[in-house]
Image: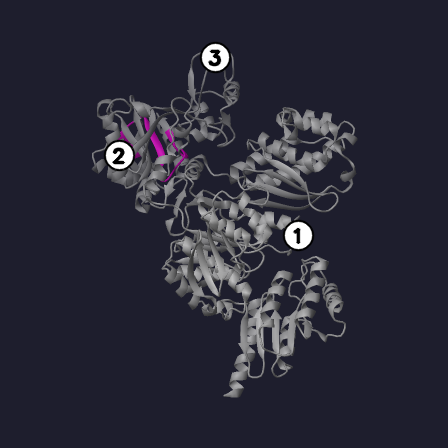
Amino acid sequence: MRIREIRAMRGPNYWSIRRHKLIVMTLDLEEYEQKPTNKIDGFLERLKTMFPGMMEHRCSVGTAGGFFQRVEEGTWMGHVIEHIALEIQSLAGMEVGFGRTRGFGEEGVYSVVFSYLEEKAGRYAAKAAVRIAEALSEAKEYDLEEDIQEMREIRERERLGPSTGSIIEEAVSRGMPWLRLNRYSLCQIGYGVNQKRIQATVSSDTSSIGVEVACDKEDTKHLLEQANIPVPKGEIVRSERGLKDAVDYIGYPLVIKPINGNHGRGITINIQNWEEATEALAAAKKISRSVIVEKYIIGDDYRLLVIDYKLIAAAKRTPAHVVGDGKSSIQELIDEINKDPRRGYGHEKVLTMIKVNDMTENILQSEGLTTESILEEGRILNLKDTANLSTGGTATDVTDIVHPENIFMAERIARVIGLNICGIDLMTTDISKPVSETGGTVLEVNAGPGFRMHLAPTEGLPRNVAAPVIDMLYPPGSTARIPIVAITGTNGKTTTTRLIAHMVKMMGHKVGYTTSDGIYIQNHMLDRGDCTGPVSAEFVLKDPTIDFAVLETARGGLLRAGLGFHHCDIAIVTNIAPDHLGIRGINTVEQMARLKGVVPETVLPDGYAILNADDDLVYDMRKNVNCNVALFSMDENNPRIQKHMANNGLSAIYENGFITICKGTWKMRVVKTAHVPLTFGGKARFMIQNVLPATLTGYIRGFDLRDIKVALESFIPSASQTPGRLNLFKFKDFDVLLDYAHNAAGMEALGKFIENLDGKPKVGIIAGIGDRRDEDNMGMGKMAAEMFDEIIIRQDKHLRGQTEEQLIALLMEGIKQHDQDIPVKICKSEKEAITFAIENAKPGSLITMCSDVVPDALKLVQDFKEKEAQELY
């Protein structure tokens, strides 16, 4: 078997609107296409032996063991690989369950689709599942545990930590969008100007000075002492001489810790003599140059969590420990504890497995023990100096018994340090009594405190500590979203996008938009090229200066990774025509419609899907949306429009020379089409079709009709405003028209437009396109012969898998089908073709250039225009 391609969906996609995280593997079964599972001796038995848990895979049968039944009856290997990929992820601690396998459009080639939690683990699972299936088929030994462990490690490297993850989950539960900004824990909640950032449990609203103070234990202690908050007696030291002075001043027992440490690193507690003190100093200095020496306080370790300066949760923390039974060695006791199903690798479960490390070995050595020593019955032995959950400790929720004086103290400490999210470590014998009575002290104040002990304590009530964080970041009345308008379809997307962005900008918004030309933030181009995919959409949504997004959304990005956003407010589908077929499993125009239909299906319930009522495939999309529907049509008598109006629906129509909004049966004429420059005096009917949904968008957003009219009248088609979209250059003796028409529907619309233009002869510059079907390129040639009196064939800059000779031959075949005698010139490049056409232009002629690299073509034509102007003047 051969894997052709592995893609990761990260947003709504062709395979699922709700399940965003999907691996899509294009798999060629090769000889296994002729080997269904019931034809491979012993396959089912080996599969059951390796994966007994697959009994729970119901498959299409719908009952336990359903998948095994399918295997017994005979199913194809792509289907088996889908289930293996799901099962091995689950075995690695990532519970996933959605999958499907469908034909790709070629014999023996399939799209194997399955869900993932961590993308890299999902990609690994795809490859491993193929290896496993081949091993099972050939009855070869296979080390499954190696794959499982590798995926566990990938998961731990890639996943958000439990604290960050809980905040993101809370945001998602409230319908807030989010983006991960790096491979660690930096995340963005919300879009544009309404975004907030979190990193672990530090937010963009958290004081950087507060974080700096909390990270410097000397400064923290100094501020707390000044505020009459009890802290341990201690000194800052940097050498053994300083340590000796501190020991003499403070006295044993001691705790020594680095001044800039976290997660318990470099801390040694209950130091009883000079030898232990010097060893602890060395351990602490590995973490930071300066070291704190404090009096070791006897009591229990408590963590008080303060969010938005209010105490939210409290937990009693207990270090990892074992209790002797008089029979088992310390290692055996540890192994028994690690069998607890709540303990796992890293952060995969609520508790972490206990590992014997240097800290453990030092503790054992100080007690005269080894891991093989047998503890007497009932003896409790701490295995760590700290009570962190990450080192195997446990936590008990005590929120409800914290004394009010201690609550007041904790909330005051947060103000003193200046942290709106902090964890306060307190040592006391009884948290239900004031520390002034128990002699307790504040050990540390932590910026970015872990939430895990509160979210899932070993004992006691779990606390949703993420909710107060979101409440703080987004108080009542605020929003995380900005308006998003998404435009898709075959033709007209870029012009519609630019027109809407222009309209929205005129209403005072700071707009970010994406097109096939580039990414624009407040009309500044920040990236050039085809920027209609999810990465470009995220670029705009990450920008903190914009308050409105208009996103052209094309087929390529949808197939590559899904949408770059999960929901939009308005989605426009301009039209669906045969284009880009035969690529990545999209072989029919109906499949293309299903793909582009993803966009309107993401509209929020109170938003609008704006659909072309003149296009059967687009009109049918209304059946799958969960939002309001508005229609547009070039024909006010379209029965679909009439029915929609009768049902009090919202629509936009072209009637009696006007762009008109219809609310129910009431008509509101916005502007005379001849006054809209984009329509070239009403001659460019396909441009009118772009104006209609743009006008509807403005109306839905609440723009005044007069403002919409001004926006439409002030949007001037030009090389800068609408590059490659009907850019007309008038030379002294001839005209040049440059357009991005690149498919049959676009060429047909262009042909109708140039019929209304003066100019004879009409010369067309065309090119074949490598990622189109042969019949599409032949059709383009035939259509060009119908439109033009002379044809220049240029080489496309991007051949996309075809040769120049193949593309020229296909175009010529189409041209000759219509006219055997039409003059045809072949040029090696677009530059050569344009140069030839302009330098040999006949007086009165119209040269029409169908360009794929618009910026280069525009510059060349503009250079010729400037040269002519210099010669004339």
Which residue position is annotated with label 1?
A: 583
Which residue position is annotated with label 2?
A: 411
Residue 858 appears in which quarter of the rendering? bottom right
Mark 3 → mark 1, Cα distance in angstroms: 67 Å
Amino acid type for the residue under numbered disc 3: Asp
Q: Can you say which quadrant of the picture contains the N terminus?
A: top right
User: Earlier along the polypeptide chain: callout 2 or callout 3?
Assistant: 3
Rendered location of residue 168, percent (x, y): 43, 39
Q: What segment carries the magenta color?
A: 244-268
Rendered location of residue 585, percent (x, y): 66, 48
In this rendering, the label closer to the viewer, 3 or 1? 1
Q: Residue at x 44, y 63 (%)?
A: 524
Amino acid type for the residue under numbered disc 1: Ile
Say if mark 3 contacts mark 1, CB within 8 Å: no
The disc label shown at residue 325, or none: 3
User: Earlier along the polypeptide chain: callout 1 or callout 2?
Assistant: 2
